[in-house]
Image (tube, rainbow, N blue to C red):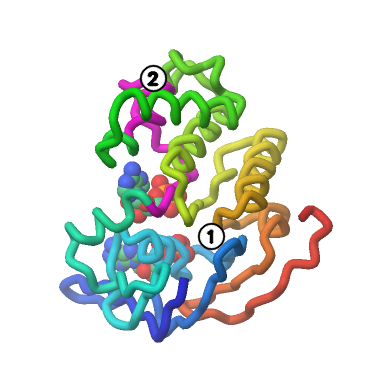
Amino acid sequence: IKIKGLNKVFRTEEVETAAINSISLEVEKGEFVAIMGPSGCGKSTLLNILGMLDSPTSGEYYLDGVEVGHMKESERTDTRKGKIGFVFQSFNLIEEMNVFENVELPLTYMKIKPSERKRRVEETLKRMSIDHRAGHFPTQLSGGQQQRVAIARAVVINPMLILADEPTGNLDSRNGKDVMELLLELNRQGTTIVMVTHSRHDASYAHRIINLFDGQVVTEVQSESLLR
Ligand code: ADP
Ligand code: ADP
């Protein structure tokens, strides 16, 4: 990830909010970065831009060497599909679909054929230790299990990048720790991770912590944690 002079301004009728104010930063392939900062400082906005869910007002965003910040919406959607996996605080699983179907969904969007989809979903559910719940629906699972399914859905596409927005925010500390251990393991296997968090403990799993304030990077510190 390489962003240069990135700005995001939200304009409503009366107010103008500079949510991202001239941010430049780089994230290396294989790095695990935590983004921290007070509520309203621009963390979600930055993550949405990195995830190609939203585009910047100005500035450049290179992902894997390609400028993706100013692509048309349709092109953006196509580009992010096989590259970026998302993990949210609220899990965002589809209630009407069982575990298998939830994890299969991104592969369906990528037009991968059914036999290959089945193989990859089963393999990923095993890796996330949730294969014994393949036929369950989200409401039949604990929070920790739901987040494991959500992580399975993010990794089933073999993404180069995982973006996580407060992944342990709705979990107790035990389940939160399991989720962080999973993310750490994925990172050790080579997946780049950018994670927004309010938790110092979770941030200490990262190589580097980027602190935002008022839409700007105020400090970048290397994590000295023994957790890694
Ligand atoms: P954080 O995730 O750090 O809490 P956000 O990125 O959600 O911060 O928001 C940064 C700033 O941008 C806030 O002042 C927020 O009110 C504003 N903002 C975010 N999204 C919108 C939007 N869709 N329309 C107008 N203002 C927004
Ligand atoms: P919060 O910042 O309150 O924790 P979420 O983690 O639920 O919010 O969502 C973060 C951002 O990702 C929001 O801007 C939301 O609109 C967007 N988002 C959530 N779910 C999806 C989805 N399934 N597909 C695309 N965008 C999503």
> How crowded is the residue under tag 1: few (<14 C-alpha within 10 Å), some, or many (20+)?
many
Q: Which residues are magenta?
A: 83-105
Residue 1 x, y percent position in the rendering: 47, 71
Q: Quadrant of the C terminus?
A: bottom right
Q: Which residue is mark 1?
A: 194
Q: Is residue 7 left or right of residue 215?
A: left
Look at the numbered disc 1 and give the secondary structure of its residue. strand
Q: Is residue 125 left or right of residue 80?
A: right
Residue depicted at x 80% and y 61%: 225
| Callout 2 amino acid | Asn
Q: Are marks 2 and 1 in contact (CB under 8 Å)?
A: no
Q: In terms of depth relative to the viewer, which is nearer, 85 or 220?
A: 85
Residue depicted at x 33% and y 38%: 106
Residue 31 x, y percent position in the rendering: 61, 64
Residue situated furthest right in the rendering? 226
| Callout 1 amino acid | Val
Residue 65 covered by magenta stretch:
no
Q: Which mark is residue 98?
A: 2
Q: Is residue 209 left or right of residue 82?
A: right
Q: In terms of depth relative to the viewer, which is nearer, 124 or 162?
A: 124
Q: CA distance from mark 2 to mark 1?
A: 28 Å
Number of numbered discs overlaid on the protein picture: 2
- In the rendered structure, which disc, 2 or 1, sits on the residue that comes first in sequence? 2
* Quadrant position of ligand 1: bottom left
Residue depicted at x 58% and y 81%: 218
Q: Is mark 1 within 8 Å of ligand 2?
A: no
Residue 223 x, y percent position in the rendering: 74, 67
Q: Is mark 2 within 8 Å of ligand 2?
A: no
Residue 140 x, y percent position in the rendering: 48, 16
> How crowded is the residue under tag 2: few (<14 C-alpha within 10 Å), some, or many (20+)?
some
Look at the numbered disc 2 and give the secondary structure of its residue. loop
Residue depicted at x 28% and y 30%: 113
